[in-house]
């Protein structure tokens, strides 16, 4: 039986968001942080409309607003709207800045990640490699933005079945993130999971297992034992054990993952039933 080895679809647009958040309305920042993207969207649309009128359609701050709006559309899977916002932001930045400016790389990266989500891997690879080249030129070799771009290109390679190429990029990205942020930063388990997925696809289970165990340990430490990310990693590790025929090792992990999911569903139900004051 083919195993449903799942990884949460993560685009790692957090760096883009952190860059934008400083000058945004607090309500919008709070909603995004709570992943209430549908509620944040009209506020972002309002910011875009106000700034376009106040600053003009070619202002760099307006390009930043468009990038924000694209992020929200992207998270909500409104891909056509996200693409239009990203492309407009990119055009302004290319016009107002030099072609190798880091802000141009940011827009290229977000558009490339959108193309990955849409399955447009050739287009994504072209944009993400261009973003990587800009960042390599602009920053030192251990800068986190280079780590992010390496990971992004690795994701394209993995989607194209080029796992051997992807693995080296993931390893370098992982080294950069660990040096820049420390061993327990949220980026670390994301890359560990992706590197493990490459090994898994190539049936290299012995290499994938310690990566998933490390990812699980970080998430339990930083997120808590009942976080949704912990459930995903538990299921991935259980799936690996199942494919190896290690059913006695897989079973308790599946049971623990199911218990976490049941608790999360119960907590959501309790919240929904709470009185509205």
Image (spheres, rainbow, N blue to C red):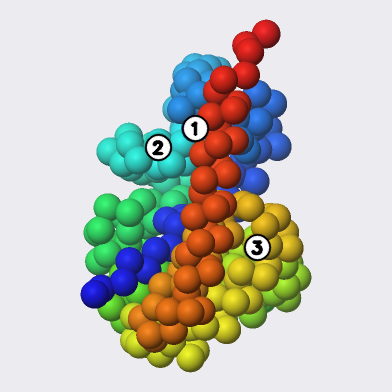
Q: Nearer the viewer, residue 56 or 179?
A: 179
The span from disc 2 to disc 1 (Cα, nearest Å) is 7 Å
Q: Earlier in the sequence, mark 2 or mark 3?
A: 2
Quarter of the rendering occupied by the C terminus: top right
Quarter of the rendering occupied by the N terminus: bottom left
The span from disc 2 to disc 3 (Cα, nearest Å) is 25 Å
| CB atoms of marks 2 and 1 within 8 Å | yes
The residue carrying mark 2 is 76
* Camera sees residue 204: yes
The residue carrying mark 3 is 219
Image height check: is 263 above or below 123?
A: above
Q: Nearer the viewer, residue 83 or 161?
A: 161
| CB atoms of marks 1 and 3 within 8 Å | no
The residue carrying mark 1 is 37
- Disc number placed over residue 243 in the picture, else none: none
- Where in the figure is residue 211, as x and y percent of width and height? 56, 80
* SS type, badge 2: loop
* SS type, badge 3: helix
Query: Which residue is drawn at the image coordinates 53% and 68% (left, top)?
Result: 253
Q: Nearer the viewer, residue 131 or 192?
A: 192
Crowding at mark 2 (Cα within 10 Å: few <14, some 14-19, many 20+): some
Image height check: is 261 above or below 188?
A: above
The span from disc 1 to disc 3 (Cα, nearest Å) is 24 Å
* SS type, badge 1: helix
Query: Which residue is drawn at the image coordinates 72% and 59% (left, top)?
Result: 222
Crowding at mark 3 (Cα within 10 Å: few <14, some 14-19, many 20+): many
Q: Earlier in the sequence, mark 2 or mark 1?
A: 1
* Camera sees residue 97: no
């Amino acid at each position: 039986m083919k195993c449903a080895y799942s990884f949460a679809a993560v685009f790692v647009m957090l760096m883009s968001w952190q860059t934008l958040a400083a000058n945004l309305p607090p309500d919008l920042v709070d909603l995004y942080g709570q992943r209430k993207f549908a509620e944040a969207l009209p506020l972002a649309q309002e910011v875009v409309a106000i700034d376009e009128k106040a600053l003009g359609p070619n202002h760099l701050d307006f390009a930043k607003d468009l990038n924000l709006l694209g992020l929200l559309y992207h998270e909500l899977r409104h891909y056509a709207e996200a693409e239009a916002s990203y492309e407009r932001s990119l055009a302004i930045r290319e016009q107002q800045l030099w072609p190798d400016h880091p802000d141009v790389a940011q827009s290229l990266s977000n558009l490339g990640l959108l193309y990955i989500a849409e399955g447009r891997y050739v287009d994504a690879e072209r944009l993400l490699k261009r973003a990587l080249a800009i960042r390599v030129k602009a920053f030192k070799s251990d800068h986190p933005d280079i780590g992010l771009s390496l990971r992004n290109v690795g994701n394209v390679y993995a989607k194209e079945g080029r796992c051997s190429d992807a693995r080296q990029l993931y390893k370098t990205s992982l080294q950069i993130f660990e040096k820049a942020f420390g061993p327990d930063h949220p980026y670390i388990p994301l890359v560990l999971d992706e590197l493990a997925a490459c090994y898994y696809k190539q049936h290299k289970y012995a290499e994938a297992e310690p990566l998933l165990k490390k990812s699980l340990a970080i998430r339990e430490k930083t997120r808590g034992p009942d976080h949704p990310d912990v459930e995903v990693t538990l299921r991935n590790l259980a799936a690996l054990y199942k494919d190896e025929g290690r059913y006695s090792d897989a079973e308790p992990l599946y049971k623990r993952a199911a218990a976490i999911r049941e608790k999360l569903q119960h907590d959501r139900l309790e919240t929904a039933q709470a009185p509205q004051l």
